[in-house]
Amino acid sequence: MKLKQSVRHFAAKQALTMPVVGDLAAGKLVDLHTRIFTDKADPDHADERREHLDGFFEATMDSYVAALEAGYTEAGAREITHVQANFDFYNHGWVEMMEIPPDELDTHYDRYREFFETFDVTIADPLGTFAPPGGIPEAPSTPAKLDDETHRYAKGGFADDVYVEGPDGELLVGGQDEPDDVAVTDAPGVSDDDV
């Protein structure tokens, strides 16, 4: 998968692993991801997916932190959450929101198999043990769209490693090193600028 990576991602990493501040950052990141993906959704279905996406992304904040604790890089931990989201999108037939082509789902799963198996994550059950006890809100599926060959946001060919587009547009395999001067206040939801 091809991701972007900036100082804000490293600041979010710091924030999500801190008490209190982590909750602020998580809330903002959930809002941000829900907005990004509802913007990619078929406009006729975007609103009905909002609560589901909020619940899903809230659960992936825990998988992100668990991946960091398991030793994955910031980019690797974030990619894990995006792969989980793409499993969910595929299961619902929301192909217009997918970031990777459906035929690369297994390859991405295999790259993170050890992590996914530890937490009972499968393509069919993208949250595994990260699912909250009461589950997350359901949203209508569009299974007929699985036959649609158009995946306008899916970028294929990046299934063998983590690919990161750095701030200067350069493509880095594995991600970039964490900068020394990261301030947690640069994380979404932490400073007054994000309120």
Image: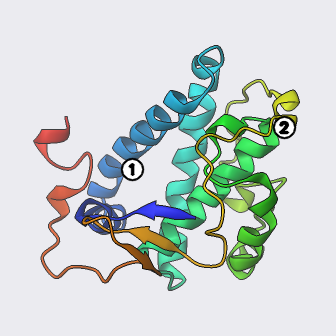
Residue at figure coordinates x 78%, y 53% from the top left: 102
Specify whether 52 is left or right of 114. left
Crowd rating for badge 2 (residues with CA inside 10 Å; few <14, some 14–19, many 20+): some
Q: Give the side of residue 122 with respect to residue 136, left or right.
A: right
Vertical comparison of 75 with 24: above or below: below
Amino acid found under the numbered disc labelled 2: Leu
Q: Position of residue 25 (x, y in %)?
A: 32, 51
Tag shown at residue 55: none
For badge 1, the amino acid type reads Ala
- Colour scheme: rainbow
Q: Residue at 62% of width from left, 40% of height from top?
A: 152
Whole-percent x, y for residue 156 in the image: 66, 60
Q: Earlier in the sequence, mark 1 or mark 2?
A: 1
Q: Quadrant of residue 177?
A: bottom left
Task: Compute the Cα span from label 1 to label 2.
Answer: 31 Å
Q: Please name the residue that numbered disc 2 is placed on.
A: 146
Q: Position of residue 88 (x, y in %)?
A: 72, 46
Quarter of the image holding residue 75? Answer: bottom left
Quarter holding the N terminus is bottom right
Element assignment for label 2: helix
Looking at the rendered image, the disc whose residue lies closer to the viewer, 1 or 2, is 2
Compare residues 177 and 173 and report the one nearer the observer. Answer: 173
Vertical relation: 161 (above or below) 6: below
Mark 1, Cα crowd under 10 Å, few <14 / some 14-19 / many 20+, is: many
Residue hosting label 1: 26
Q: Which residue is at a point 44% across and 32% down the rendered structure image?
A: 35
Quarter of the image with the C terminus in it: top left
